[in-house]
Image (spheres, rainbow, N blue to C red):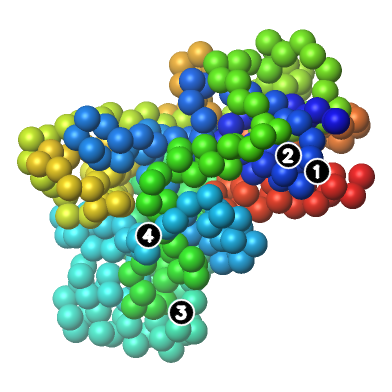
Amino acid sequence: MKTNLVVGCGLSGATIARKIAEELNEKVIIIDKKSHIAGNTYDYRDKNGIMIHKYGSHIFHTNLENVWGFVNHFADFNTYMHKVIAIIDGIKTTIPFNIRTLYDVFPKTMAENMEKKLLAKFEYNKKVPILEFQKQDDKDLKFLAEYVYEKVFLHYTAKQWGANPSEVDSAVTARVPVYISCDERYFQDKYQGIPLHGYTNMVKKILNYQNIEVRLNTQYTDIKEAYNRVFFTGSIDEFFNYKYGELPYRSVYFKMEEYDFPYYQNNAVVNYPCNYDFTRIHEYKYYLNDISDKTVIAKEYSEFFEQGKNERYYPIPNEANKKLYAKYLTEAQQMQNIYFLGRLGDYCYYDMDKAINRALELFEQIKGE
């Protein structure tokens, strides 16, 4: 029987491990340097009975039928549809900025005028990236574009990415567009929800198979045995001992606070684009409607990744970093039976469903080898 090593017990690693073990009937050793499975989707119930997302809010959303089918083998999901509140000029409103937002932040006659002009220029239900939206000739829409840029994108992006929006890859800024719609949901995917028993439980079930062995608190450098294949979901530059230089990442710090009253805010996530040093506040009990006389929040602060200080969260996609990653990718492609995947292995800003889909596609690739 062939034996495989998977490095990383997050969604990417767990998915490829299960597919190999179950469908190829091969042995899989899956390791993680953390003391728990599920990677950054790790969650747990605290002393108050609240399901805490340790590494920030994770809302599952996808249009991919194969991914939705896969995760539903291991978890039942609620029908939670995510909305994000933002405080703009002291006013609570929803983002992405949409037609309803107009009426929240502007006087009615002004909002009506802008709505007419938006619908005359853009197709309804169209998502317009902010840097594209700024290219306006009409003076009212130009004012609106500058307003949205400053109040929603500029300061928030500076806090989250440590850079001006124009310096951030368009694939990132396009994630929160101007939405020409009355739909206030943050995501419009067909399938949305939170696992009823948590992400950790879902990953535990994915890994619960006779051919899979889980080893926690284990570094890749601790492994001495030889394997038929290695699947590496850690940072690709670390794998190659940074021979071409270190790939930059953003990290996140969560300041957890507990309060002796049922709710701190009126929504799961509230963004603060222009106020405070934190980017947003998470209140976890909303996701599964946890009932408790207390509540737990997390204030989210972004910072650059530094080895030994914090965790890698988001690759920083710009031209210089893409070129550096390409050097590592070329090196990786010359190796036999070693595969890289996941946010860190692919140096790609994956959502959860895309990370799972990447693992499913890689499995189909190696299945035919």
What is the secondary structure assignment of the residue under circle 4?
loop
Of the 4 image quadrants, the one containing the C terminus is top right
Q: Using the numbered discs, state the Cα–Cα distance from disc 4 to disc 1 in whole angstroms.
A: 32 Å
Which residue does the numbered mark 1 point to in the structure image? Answer: 24
Q: In this figure, which residue is indicated by the disc labeled 4?
A: 78
Q: Are marks 4 and 1 in contact (CB under 8 Å)?
A: no
Residue under label 3, please give it.
Answer: 125
* Amino acid found under the numbered disc labelled 4: Asn
Report the Cα–Cα distance between label 3 and label 4. 26 Å
Q: Which residue is drawn at 34% across and 78% down?
A: 182
- Tell whether 78 sits left or right of 130: left
Q: Percent position (x, y) of residue 304?
A: 48, 28
4 or 1: tag closer to the N-terminus: 1
Residue at mark 2: 21
In this rendering, the answer to whether 227 lies above or below 259 is above
Residues at marks 2 and 3, CA–CA distance in whole angstroms: 43 Å
Task: Examine the rendering and report whether any part of residue 70 can be seen.
Answer: yes
User: Within the image, what quadrant is residue 211 found in?
Assistant: top right
Asked whether residue 167 is in view, the answer is no
Q: Which residue is drawn at 31% across and 57% down?
A: 84
Quote the CA–CA distance across marks 4 and 2: 29 Å
Q: Indicate which label's residue lies in the foreground, 3 or 4.
A: 4
First of labels 4, 2 by sequence position: 2
Place residue 98 in its image quadrant: bottom left
Residue shown at 58% from the left, 32% from the top = 9
Residue 159's quadrant in the figure? top left
Q: Where is residue 300 in the image (x, y as percent from the top left)?
A: 33, 36
Labels 1 & 2 near each other (Cβ < 8 A):
yes
Residue 119: x and y in percent read 41, 86
In percent of the image, x 52 and y 37: which residue is there? 204
Name the residue type under label 1. Leu
89 over 58 or under it: above or below: below
